[in-house]
């Protein structure tokens, strides 16, 4: 008998392990708990208990159809409902993770932009410092260049002045040293000199020639018209330096020849000396 009971219990356990049977049993117990309580704990007699159960709780709807519907709902519909909940739960979890990922990416992008901005600011500061240093160097170079330009301008003025002086000296040297003439030139110049001696302004040739030869100037006491006649006759010429504001008078080649002829034609007498006291007649 005991073995029979154990076999029945084992068989019942196997049946209960079946999802549908287990669901049906639990649904039936959940619906028909009143007749079970009445049967087990009522103070009435067994016959009265059975009669009450048959009278009040023997409906086929409660004992079969409703537990069957609940078992089918539990076996078939509940998994889909759970799947639906899992789907929405997974979707919500996925969206939550995506939002968290987006938030982190947004945070990373913000830090990245901040780092780029700080790098650009540092680069701008560095470029500004470099530009400031470069501007200072350019200003110093500009000042140095300006000073050098002033020096160059002064040197150019000096070079121009020296060049002018050199040209003037060269002309003077040429006029003074180039006294070699051909026979034809001497004949022509002798004729012109003879004609010059007949001119009225030749009387001043000694004073004018001596002043020009020795001081490169003309006598102040002589009329300017006479000086102009000497210039237009090609005997002397003016050399004017506007930068130095100087005016010199020099002989031309013709004038140098005239002056040589004039000086050569003058005889210089020896100055007389006063006799001593012993030579006096008294």
Image (tube, rainbow, N blue to C red):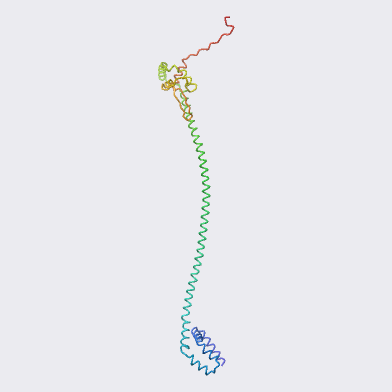
Image quadrant where one finds the C terminus: top right
Q: Nearer the viewer, residue 267 or 63?
A: 63
Q: Nearer the viewer, residue 89 or 185?
A: 89
Q: Is residue 241 above or below residue 187?
A: below
> Residue 262 in the image: x percent, y percent?
45, 17
Q: Is 134 on the left or on the right of 188, as rendered?
A: right
> Residue 151 in the image: x percent, y percent?
51, 36
> Residue 154 in the image: x percent, y percent?
50, 34
Q: Nearer the viewer, residue 71 or 190?
A: 71
Image quadrant where one finds the N terminus: bottom right
Q: Which residue occupies the extreme top position in the image? A: 282
Q: How many marks?
A: 0
> Residue 280 in the image: x percent, y percent?
57, 6
């Amino acid at each position: 008998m005991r073995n029979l009971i154990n076999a029945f219990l084992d068989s019942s356990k196997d049946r209960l392990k079946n999802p549908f049977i287990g669901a049906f049993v639990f649904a039936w117990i959940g619906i028909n708990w009143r007749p079970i309580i009445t049967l087990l704990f009522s103070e009435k007699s067994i016959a009265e208990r059975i009669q009450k159960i048959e009278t009040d709780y023997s409906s086929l709807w409660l004992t079969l159809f409703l537990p069957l519907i609940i078992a089918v709902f539990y076996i078939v519909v509940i998994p889909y409902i759970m799947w639906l909940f899992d789907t929405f739960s997974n979707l919500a979890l996925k969206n939550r993770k995506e939002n968290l990922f987006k938030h982190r990416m947004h945070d990373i992008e913000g830090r990245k932009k901040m780092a780029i901005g700080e790098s650009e600011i540092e680069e701008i500061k560095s470029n500004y410092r470099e530009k400031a240093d470069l501007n200072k160097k350019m200003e110093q170079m500009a000042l140095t260049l300006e000073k050098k330009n002033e020096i160059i301008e002064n040197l150019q003025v000096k070079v121009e002045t020296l060049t002018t002086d050199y040209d003037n000296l060269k002309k003077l040297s040429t006029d003074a040293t180039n006294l070699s003439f051909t026979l034809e030139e001497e004949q022509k110049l002798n004729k012109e000199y003879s004609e010059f001696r007949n001119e009225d302004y030749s009387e001043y040739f000694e004073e004018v020639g001596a002043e020009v030869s020795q001081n490169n100037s003309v006598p102040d006491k002589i009329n300017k018209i006479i000086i102009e006649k000497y210039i237009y006759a090609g005997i002397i010429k003016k050399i004017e330096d506007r930068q130095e504001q100087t005016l010199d008078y020099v002989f031309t080649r013709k004038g140098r020849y005239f002056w040589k002829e004039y000086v050569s034609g003058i005889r210089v007498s020896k100055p007389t000396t006063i006799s001593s006291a012993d030579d006096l007649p008294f």
